[in-house]
Image: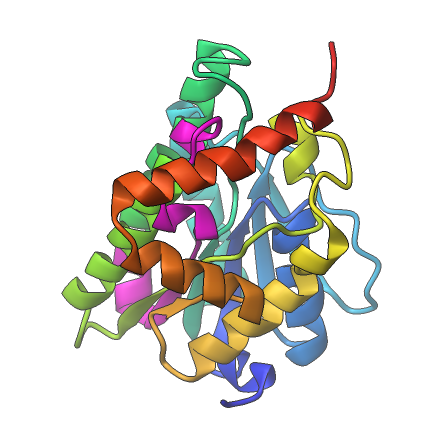
Amino acid sequence: MPPPRDALLPFSAVIVTGGSSGIGKSFIELGAKLNPGLQFCNLSRRAPVIKIAGLKLNHFACDLSRPADIERVLPELTAFLAQAMPAGRVLLINNSGFGSYGHFPAPGLDHQLEMLDVNVRGLVELTGRLLPLLQARGGAIINVASTAAFQPTAYMAAYGASKAFVLHWSLALNEELRGSGVRTLAVCPGPTATEFFRRAGLQPGSVADSLSVTSEGVVLAALRALAAGRSQVVPGWKNKVSVFFASKLPKPLVARIAALVLARFRLKQVRP
């Protein structure tokens, strides 16, 4: 498989959502080290704190759960790119997303709806509005899904369903974009050492280190897959094995097994 650096050589600019922490932050950090000339544009509520000499990073404050924020920030983003990097291919990384744990609709219906707005609607809207730019300049789209996309996930029902949407929408979009100069890659990480568990209402360390992948590992796998022209990647061999069986077994059986596994997290919930 080609080295990660090869994936970034064709691009002059990277647009990433949720770059203030976790996988999104690792995309910026590793990307800047592999291709120091890249211009990064981050869309998230908080600005990333990254200390890399010569890093070209511009932050656009944006709450992706709010359509008005996306509509406001896009003219600023496109104007900035036209001035700072008027030519060259653009890489869009839709990374923002969060989950929840508990019996639906816990921890609250508003939380569930905000999650769907970020994980699904915001991703689709941002991609749709930026697609003409990517087609005009050439580019690629990386959508961060999850291994949860491959089976129903009791106690995380809406989250798993949102990631199933991201996976299948990405694969379908990649086929629609054939010959357009733009392609799509769905990245499906398993448990990752990020702020995800805290936001989902679980204690740190809920998943054993032996079962998790670092955010840097996820990014490296994604870049290798992008360089190889793939449309889907599952980082980590243990995740590949679980996804294989989840894809082959009947959905009701997989849902039951996932429910038994995920039920164990109830002991690790953060208590109010």
Q: Is residue 140 magenta?
A: yes
86, 230: nearer the viewer: 230
Q: Position of residue 103 (x, y in %)?
A: 48, 17
Residue 214 position by quadrant? bottom right
Does residue 121 appear to the left or right of 224 in the view shown? left
Q: What span is colored magenta in the figure?
A: 131-159
Q: Residue at (47%, 66%) from the top-left corner? A: 241
Q: Residue at (47%, 32%) from the top-left corner? A: 64
Task: Say if residue 62 shows up in the picture.
Answer: no
Does residue 73 appear to the left or right of 60 in the view shown? left
Q: Is residue 253 above or below residue 112?
A: below
Does residue 143 appear to the left or right of 213 in the view shown? left
Q: Residue furthest bottom?
A: 2
Does residue 178 appear to the left or right of 21 in the view shown? left
Q: Is residue 144 above or below residue 159?
A: below
Q: Position of residue 8 (x, y in %)?
A: 53, 78
Q: Residue at (78%, 69%) from the top-left corner? A: 54
Q: Position of residue 131 (x, y in %)?
A: 28, 55
Task: Say if residue 19 shows up in the picture.
Answer: yes
Query: Where's the C terminus, which quadrant?
Result: top right
Residue 154 position by quadrant? top left
Q: Is residue 125 above or below residue 80?
A: above
